[in-house]
Amino acid sequence: MKKKIVINTPLKIDGEIILPGSKSITNRALLFSALSEGKTYLKNILYSDDVKYMLNALKLLGIKYNLSNDKKICKIYGVGNKFPITKNVTLFLGNAGTAVRFLLSVLSIKNSNIIITGDERMKNRPIKHLVDSLIQGEAKISYIQRKNFLPIKTNGQFKGGTITLNGSISSQFLTALLIAAPLSLKKTKILIKGKLVSKPYIDITIKMMKSFGVIIKNFNYKFFLINGNQKYISPKKYFIEGDASSASYFLSAAAIKGGTVIIKGVGKKSIQGDIKFCSILKKMGAKIYLGKNFIQCTKNKLKSIDMDMNDIPDAAMTIAITALFSNGTTNIRNIYNWRVKETDRLYAMATELKKIGAKVEEGKDYLTITPPRKFKKVEIETYNDHRIAMCFSLISLSGTSVTILNPNCINKTFPNYFKDFLSICKYT
């Protein structure tokens, strides 16, 4: 029997949420700290499944670290250019795309004879364009079972040079190359083929690398120049801001059925692209205020939107649900990369939205959503995708309860999500 959680309709939404750390920033910071010499204190890390896979991999690769009792502070003992210390190991990384792509690239520098694999979904997610780019830089990489998919073995020897990368599938491929290139022997020039998706995640990477002493030259996302033989330098202490993608659910809840919700841990100076979600929600009619380290949202009448959301694919899913409570038809465009995430999110979102009574058109790279006249009481299939589980919790604000199947899939990025969501649901 499948596990499930039933969420009933609250009278209103009101309260404060302290956000967990950003997954994107946490996994980058863990790797950068390992690649630096000396100790780094990482504060407000996200302790979730994806982060556990990264931590376990670093341990297998010879990195020592200590976690605080509350799992929010991690002290890492970096080894600099000695990384990895351990060779001839197999890294199982579940469905953690960041861990797979980033580690593959960094481990392609030295002759380490390491196998990288993951769960069944990860074995079907794209890796070919990253592998092809690393091979252009002389890396020795081989597929073990199926060509173009995990598991793969890397035998080092990546030297950099001029590399062409298809940027239309995942920004994680470019991030992976940017992380490894400064450690290579040669100066690297990365030429982007096609339109680069999710640019804000590249901005996160470049800003964080600068904090760890590495400089990247970005020429309007068309090409990137990186000097070789650089070193990652520990900033000693690094604070990980709250996850802006996770903030989206609580902000939408307030916009739909507030009350007022205050989100603490991220604000107007965020380095995350998903902070743009606030301006979109405001454009839809919500009352939004961004402080230095908080965001406040209050209910207002919502209207539909027609927008290219390629830059914020995760938060765009929350907009799709918010559209159900808006006046008119919402069109979310240029989101083909939804199809290569934890599941085919375009198919999954369209299927589940239709279940609850919405009129939906699913295109190759877009979703058009017209609100239902009446919400249907249904069970939501989550496809083992954390963001679908979190998004569809908002259906409970419709006046109809919602049942979420496999709710534990939220452990990938936000283990306490349902607890936090219910804390702002007021039933009396």
Image (cartoon, helix red, strand yellow):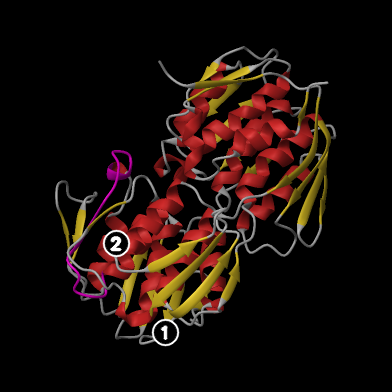
Q: Is residue 380 magenta?
A: no
Q: Position of residue 113 (x, y in %)?
A: 17, 66
Q: Residue at x 49, y 56 (%)?
A: 197
Under mark 1, the amino acid is Lys
* Camera-nearest label, 2 or 1: 2
The part of the image, by quadrant, that contains residue 258 is top right
> How many numbered marks are there?
2
Q: Which residue is mark 1?
A: 231
Task: Specify the label residue 151 is tagged with.
Answer: none
* Magenta region: 108-123
Q: Is residue 121 magenta?
A: yes
Q: Residue at x 39, y 57 (%)?
A: 54
Q: Is residue 363 visible?
A: no
Q: Which mark sits nearer the N-terminus, 2 or 1?
A: 2
Q: Position of residue 12 (x, y in %)?
A: 81, 27
The part of the image, by quadrant, that contains residue 123 is top left
Tag 2 secondary structure: helix
Q: Which residue is mark 2?
A: 60
Q: Position of residue 21 (x, y in %)?
A: 60, 55
Q: Quadrant of the N terminus?
A: top left
Q: CA distance from mark 2 to mark 1?
A: 22 Å
Q: Residue at x 84, y 32 (%)?
A: 301
Q: Quadrant of the C terminus?
A: top right
Q: Is residue 144 visible?
A: yes
